[in-house]
Image: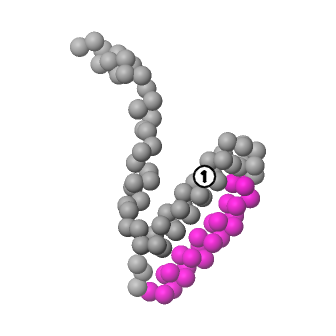
């Protein structure tokens, strides 16, 4: 946490300006792609549930909500990994 008030104020003003500048392009993109709209809404719901749980005293780690997602390597068929080695 910043010890100087001017650093915190500057960071908040910069963050607010970035959000204001990015809101229109991101909103247009989400409106053009219905799948992204559902993904964005579910992400907001997840954040809301985490904030409510924290306010009620739940001390679960945030990684609990992000670790179950499979990595891109998990989506590759297993026989494709065997071919990478060159048959050694």
Say few, some or many: other residues with alpha carbon within 10 Å of mark 1 (under 14 / 14 to 19 / 20 or more): few
Q: Measuring from the top left, give residue 82's x and y in whole percent.
A: 32, 18
Horizontal side of 24 relative to 41 (left or right) equals: right
Look at the image and tell me in which quarter the N terminus lies. bottom left
4, 36: nearer the viewer = 36
Q: Measuring from the top left, give residue 34's x and y in whole percent.
A: 72, 43
Horizontal side of 67 relative to 12 (left or right) equals: left
In reply to whether residue 15 is colored magenta, the answer given is: yes
Residue at horizontal 62 percent and vertical 47 percent from the top: 39
Look at the image and tell me in which quarter the C terminus lies. top left
In what element is the residue under mark 1? helix
Asked if residue 49 is positioned above or below residue 3 in the image, the reply reads above
23, 18: nearer the viewer = 23
Horizontal side of 70 relative to 17 (left or right) equals: left
Task: List the residue tagged with mark 1.
Answer: 42
Instruction: Tell me where the magenta segment starts and ends, as one range.
Output: 4-27
Q: Measuring from the top left, give residue 28's x and y in whole percent.
A: 75, 52
Residue at horizontal 56 percent and vertical 63 percent from the top: 48
Which residue is situated farthest in the left direction here? 88
Asked if residue 29 is positioned above or below residue 59 in the image, the reply reads above
In reply to whether residue 26 is colored magenta, the answer given is: yes
Which residue is situated farthest in the top direction here? 87
């Amino acid at each position: 946490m910043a010890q100087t008030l001017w650093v915190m104020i500057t960071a908040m003003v910069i963050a607010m300006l970035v959000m204001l500048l990015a809101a229109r392009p991101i909103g247009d993109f989400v409106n053009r792609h219905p799948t992204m709209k559902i993904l964005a809404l579910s992400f907001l719901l997840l954040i809301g549930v985490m904030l409510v749980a924290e306010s009620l005293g739940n001390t679960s780690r945030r990684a609990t909500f992000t670790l179950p997602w499979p990595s891109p390597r998990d989506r590759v068929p297993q026989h494709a990994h065997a071919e990478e080695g060159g048959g050694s």
